[in-house]
Amino acid sequence: MDATNGLQTPQLTFEEEVKAFFDSAPPLQNCAEISEKLKEFIARNSQHSDGNAKRVVCVTSGGTTAPLEQRCVRYVDNFSSGHRGATSTEYFLKAGYAVIFLYRRGSFQPFCRSLPDDPLLECFESNDDSNIRVREVHAEAVKRAIIEHEAAVADGLLLKLPYRTIFEYLQMLQMTAMSMRCLGPRGMFYLSAAVSDYYVPWKDMVEHKIQSGSHLLDVKLVQVPKMLLVLGEEWAPSAFCISFKLETDSNILLKKADKALRKYKMHAVVANELSTRKEEVVVVTSSEKITVRRNTSQPGDDVENPLIKLLSGRHLAYIEESSSIR
Ligand code: 9Z3
């Protein structure tokens, strides 16, 4: 695949690239339903039954696909499992947030991380009367998953919205951000999804399955416009924005995170290296680089535990600071 786009393409401004992306994207199928769910969720948490206006975070999770055919058989994907997003969602809920969980279909889900890969078949068994019961060995994990998930949903604190493609993801992120605008600084974006860097614009994509048989497959991929800038400047200008930077070469990680912080005007960038991402991350802000590690002396602890504590504290300070300058 030629990611350098060997064709002579016209030079577009950034604004034109963004417009071209959205203009050419296939419209979201359940747009009205998503919009209604967002409206209702945000209204409810702006005046929650416990009397407090909640802080609301949009957690993006998993990886986007870039389809190669309109009637998609093949697509470009990435490694992301959604573990970071699902785990962080649990800790955000614990910290008192309402969470919009924008996740890749089929990726890890909050409260289900400790269940086996095939939970339905592995967690349950039938007895002699063909009644279904939970296997003893998984009973604790299943009970915890159900109780904690039910509590979050019953309290109206968790809204789950699935995506698969880069087109769906960016349209849903835009809708979510516009809906969260009314929250001002109480809104937060925690952008842990691994977003495709390159895609085939819908209008340039073949309709039917690409036929095999030729020695070389020549597909032109175009850079996905970095929507982080648009998010912070236009879609939700008062929100607290955290993005992630992933590298496999630890020598360039912090420099790249620092660059992203300034270029996309984020409040913090969480830098992580592929092989150690579950053990430690570095939170890069304009004035600090804070290493956050999983507490290894506490069995089952996650790096997201201290990470969300740190970010939640920073978000509170940001809200106070924003209200004092209004
Ligand atoms: C991350 O860096 C996440 O922490 C991981 C989590 C994807 C590594 P898993 O889902 O992994 O738990 O398996 N996410 C963002 C990666 C990314 O694509 N960042 C962009 C970049 O590096 C900036 S938007 O250019």
Image (cartoon, grey):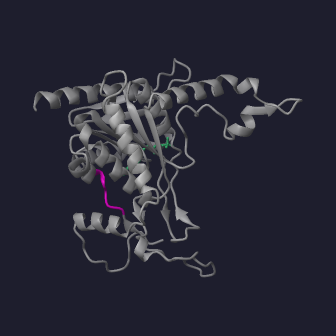
Write the residue at 35% across / 43% down. 39
Viewer-closest of 276 and 196: 196
- Residue 211: % across, % down: 61, 79
Q: Relative to 193, does residue 68 appear above or below in the rendering? A: below
Image point (63%, 81%), residue name = 213
From the viewer's perspective, is residue 308 above or below residue 3? Answer: above
What's drawn in magenta, residue-wise?
A: 224-228
**In screen coordinates, is 215 left or right of 46?**
right
Residue depicted at 20% across the width and 33% down the height: 287
In the rendered image, the vertical position of residue 292 relative to residue 2, given as above or below? above
**The residue positioned farthest toward the right in the image shown:** 128
Left or right: residue 209 versus residue 130 is left
Residue 2, percent from left and from top: 44, 72
Position in image of residue 215 (x %, y %): 59, 80
- Can residue 276 be seen? no
Where is the C terminus found, in terms of image quarters?
Answer: top left
Q: Is residue 240 left or right of residue 60?
A: left
Q: Picture coordinates of residue 54 (x, y %)?
A: 32, 28
- Does residue 206 appear in the picture of this structure? yes
By secondary structure, the bulk of the magenta-drawn segment is best described as loop
Magenta span contains residue 33: no
Relative to 189, residue 55 above or below:
above
Q: How many numbered discs, if any?
A: 0
Q: Is residue 226 magenta?
A: yes
Q: Residue at x 41, y 69 (%)?
A: 3
Q: Quadrant of residue 185?
A: top left
| Direction top: furthest residue | 297
Q: Is residue 149 left or right of residue 5?
A: right
Q: Picture quarter containing residue 150?
A: top right
Q: Residue 276 versus residue 221: which sits nearer the camera?
A: 221
Q: From this viewpoint, which residue is outermost toward the left?
A: 325
